[in-house]
Image (spheres, coloured by chain):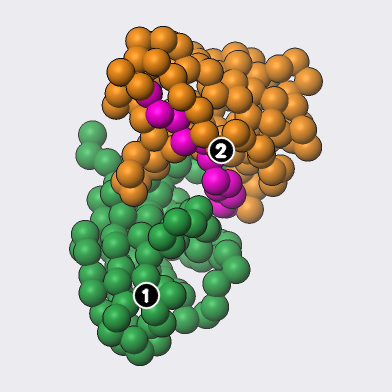
Chain colours: A green, B orange
Amino acid sequence: EAGVTQSPTHLIKTRGQQATLRCSPISGHTSVYWYQQALGLGLQFLLWYDEGEERNRGNFPPRFSGRQFPNYSSELNVNALELEDSALYLCASNRGQQYEQYFGPGTRLTVT
Amino acid sequence: DAKTTQPPSMDCAEGRAANLPCNHSTISGNEYVYWYRQIHSQGPQYIIHGLKNNETNEMASLIITEDRKSSTLILPHATLRDTAVYYCIVSSGNYGQNFVFGPGTRLSVLP
């Protein structure tokens, strides 16, 4: 069974640009979660999508947004990039909110 | 969701059991205890979870005290590949199960 996949592996952008990160959940999983892990910091919850809807978001500004497609894959968009957005962005999926999450390998975003 | 407290670091000799403690004294009755580990900026790896009973799988055992205020993750025969940051998380699954990750315990398995 394939795990959670994320693309791209690395992404380099300049300040003010937009970044788009993609995630494909494990087959059969309907929920997708996004987390940010800045260098030396812990993982912080960003967004939760379930059945195509945004269900919850963490303490991040509105320029962090995303969506979930009918096939349950998801996209995270970060607008007006700032230097402090440089981080590892992790996607996780599960088959329902009572179940364990499985994480992808992450996308490392560097903003210069 | 309840907060957890873990020691910042631990050492363990290769081949010995690694016992990683976690305190979650404010845990609610419907909150599960989850354990994950992260090896050098890779995505966190799910290890095990439980509600009140002890759990065991191919990776580890989870011992939860009767009052559920603390738990211990046991890696029965630690190897060098078990060197990682281990996270203990409590979550009810309500509101999307947005895990709150603390700093975790950095386990170093020594040869």
Q: Label 1: chain?
A: A
Crowding at label 1, few (<14), some or many (≥20) Cα neighbours within 10 Å?
some
Which residue in the protein does label 2 denote? B8
Q: Is residue A57 left or right of residue A110?
A: right
In the rendered view, tell whether residue A112 sits above or below residue B67. Answer: below
Q: Is residue A95 left or right of residue B62?
A: left
Residue B38: image location, x then y, percent: 39, 40
Question: Do marks 2 and 1 both belong to one polypeptide chain?
Answer: no
In which image quadrant can residue B29 be found? top right
Bounds of the magenta segment: B96-109
Near-viewer residue (A30 or B22): B22
User: CA–CA distance between discs 2 and 1?
Assistant: 33 Å
Q: Is residue B57 magenta?
A: no
Per the image, label 2 sits on a secondary structure element best described as loop
Circle 2 or circle 1, nearest the eye: 2
Can residue B9 be seen from the camera position used here? yes
Q: Label 2: chain?
A: B
Q: Is residue A27 left or right of residue B50?
A: left
Looking at the image, which residue is at 39% across and 15% down?
B13
